[in-house]
Amino acid sequence: MLNTLKLPQKDALRTKTENISGSEILLKAFIAEGVDTIFGYPGGAIMPIYDALYDYQQQLNHILVRHEQGGIHAAQGYARASGRTGVVFATSGPGATNLITGLADALIDSTPLVCITGQVFAHLLGTDAFQETDVINITTPVTKWNFQVTDARELPSAIAKAFHIAGSGRPGPVLIDITKNAQLQKIDFEGYTPCKFLRSYRPKPIVRREPIEQAAALINKAKRPFVLWGQGVILGKAEQEFRAFIEKTGIPAAWTILGLSALSTDHPLNVGMLGMHGNYGPNLLTNECDVMIAIGMRFDDRVTGRLDKYAKQATIIHLDIDPSEIDKNVKADVGIWGDCKETLPILTELVEKGSHKEWLQRFYDCTKEEEKQVIHDELHPTTSEMTMGEVINVMNELTGGDAIVVTDVGQHQMVACRYAKFNQTKSNVTSGGLGTMGFALPAAIGAKFGAPDRTVIAIIGDGGFQMTIQELGTIMQSNVDVKIIILNNRFLGMVRQWQQLFHDKRYSFVNITSPDFVMVAKGYGIAGKSISDRNDLRESLQTMLNHPGAFLLEIMVGKENNVFPMVPQGCSVSEIRLK
Amino acid sequence: MAKEQYTITIYTENNVGLLNRIAIIFSRRKINIDSLNSSPSEIDGIYRFTIVIDETEEVVRKLARQIEKQVEVLKAYYNTNDEIVWQEMALYKVPADQITEKAKVERLLREYGARAVVIRRDYIIFETTGHREETDKLVKVLEPYGMIEFVRTARVAIIKASHGFHEKLKDFEEMQPGSKLVENEFLNKQDEVFTM
């Protein structure tokens, strides 16, 4: 059965009928959707699409990556930095299976992607043909939606649905698997019609006023209200609305790792980071607030710590576009379903202008305590070895908080997110939910294409860098201007920290050796430098930032430094340890 | 909170792969499906899955939300047994000689509300419709007569209070997030559980 959309033809972008191949239809659809960049890797089953792409190089910039995982992470970086849907090409079989990690990452971090995989001829499906794999079933748990096209006539509607589903509501990755015959098949193409509506899919719940009124009444009576915000604010493009809300009410606000940069880090009401390695105040005072307002966040276990001791004293208001998130982990007293771009302005209008000076002061006091016990030594160490924090601190001074910072996963990620300064939204790109090591290097490449006018700095550990090190080839070939900082502690630092704290220092396979990164970079024609002396830090970072084109700066840091504060696993957030 | 039998009714588009998308929502959480049926619904082109599981209300509510989140799912409802009318159908193949000689066919048919679907020289196929206990009862009765084959369908159910899909849809729009929270039993066992 053909799954065609029945939309009025007046919406079609082309009206002249042409007889063209499925592959060409795909590319025309991309152009109609405003796609400018594709990250991909060719192979047998996607060759007709690549053949068509040969004639579309002016309109569509294809970036040849070195591994499909790099391709999809790059598309994620592109999407996160630009707020648009990232596009990936991969071939069948191994090409498609290499996308899985990126799909899982994009699903859990709500990143809009459209992935196109080639597939064997339709008549070969199920025959164990060369490079055939059951991509649809493999990717079902890690896609928002997926679909196999076996006839070119299905293509226009499949692509239209793909972009609609990927980018609307709570965004996510979509995969379209196209058999080779459908790529080659010529059909009469009447023009591309974008999809605006699917009857079974409601991207945004209908906004109801009553819960918002209830929430406003609770907020107006609150003595110690506390806002938690997540990536929903960024995805909903509701940064202004969010700021207006907290500024009117004067409520202190803390962020989840993916919410970072939605509000500038030096805003007086921005009290810091939530969760396991978050700031002292936001964690400690979670268990003292009387009204908690969670906006576009999902109460991940890394944020909540032990649930039965999480904000039990508080009345909880939860705003989310995804109804399945409300009550999933933390029971909401008032659940506000909807896009925060729509719900926040209503709430802001209903709440009274206010300030919570004493309550806010408690956060500032906690910051002072944290400053004394943790931050000062991290940013201004007296040890001979450098700390990760001081690197970020000097970087902040040089960039002024204007750069896009892409981080990998582990200690450096926590340190970078804790200390990096941000002045504008969509500046923090990291793998939050899935914690994918190897994410940063390809994601930084994508971020640069998504925001070509901005400085993109990838901060990566020595372990994660070696997971996708091959993408240096992409940087070389496509002249991608990304600045790479490797914070090298010669350990898989986060696992080592846990082994130290919870496994009697039994350092089981965390001792990782690295190649000469600068020489590796040199092999790829990328300038680089390695430093281990504090006196070289500022100048080297400046050199990196001034360098025209990509630059790799390896910074040797203390081997056994730990990230603090820390909420140990199984503890309440208020049991946060400062050392 | 005690586990109970719940019937989940799901209205969907009719697309290849959707069954898998729904099934993995259960298997990911290691929840066993007791019975699963797919059939057309009262609305043209919309399909209806009926799934029976044994779980707590809390778990079922979250499952229903996850199911409804799927792009091609229109709506997912869940009901306890007292909120629905349901039936299962069973077929029994029994050797004809045994049955005609030793048991009174007519009595069987009357007593168990059964129907003979096929009567052959070598075997008879009976059919009954009813709740699980009812169809099970006839198995017990027929077993001594050398029952050759037995098969039972999945549950099909209709919600007593429903006024059809469109009306129910409005009810669910009004529904607020629920009231109870299940906490992770492993969170209290930090020494035994190591996660990264």
Image: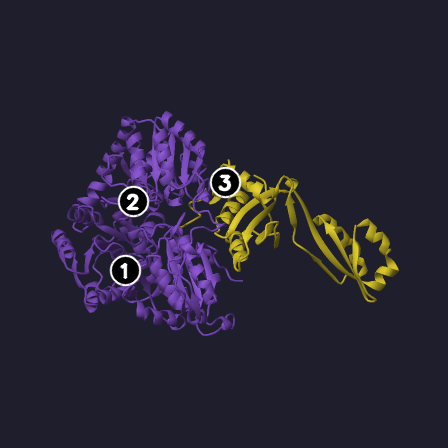
Chain colours: A purple, B yellow
Regarding residue A438, the answer to whether it shows in the image is: no
Q: Amino acid at mark 2?
A: Leu
Whether A543 is drawn above or below A22: the answer is: above
The answer to which of A542 and A31 lies nearer the viewer is A31
Observer able to see residue B145 = yes
The image quarter in which residue A48 lies? bottom left
Q: Position of residue B123 (x, y in %)?
A: 80, 64
Q: Which residue is mark 1?
A: A465
From the image, tell me which residue sits under label 3. Answer: B182
| Depth check, front residue: B154 or A42 | A42
Disc 3 secondary structure class: loop
Q: For mark 1, name the chain.
A: A
Along the line of sight, which residue is nearer the eye, B17 or B29? Answer: B17
Q: Which chain is home to disc 2? A: A
Report the residue marked by disc 2. A260
- How packed mark 2 is, by other alpha carbons closer than 10 Å (few <14, some 14-19, many 20 or more), is many
Q: Residue at x 48, y 67 (%)?
A: A151
For the residues bearing labels 1 and 2, Cβ distance under 8 angstroms: no
Taking A530 as reference, is A233 left or right?
Answer: right
User: How far is the residue under mark 3 from the one under mark 1?
Assistant: 39 Å
* Mark 1 closeness class: few <14, some 14–19, many ≥20 residues within 10 Å: many
- Give how far apart the Cα atoms at labels 2 and 3 are: 29 Å
Circles 3 and 1 on the same chain:
no
Task: Please state the chain letter of the residue tagged with numbered disc 3 in the rendered image.
Answer: B
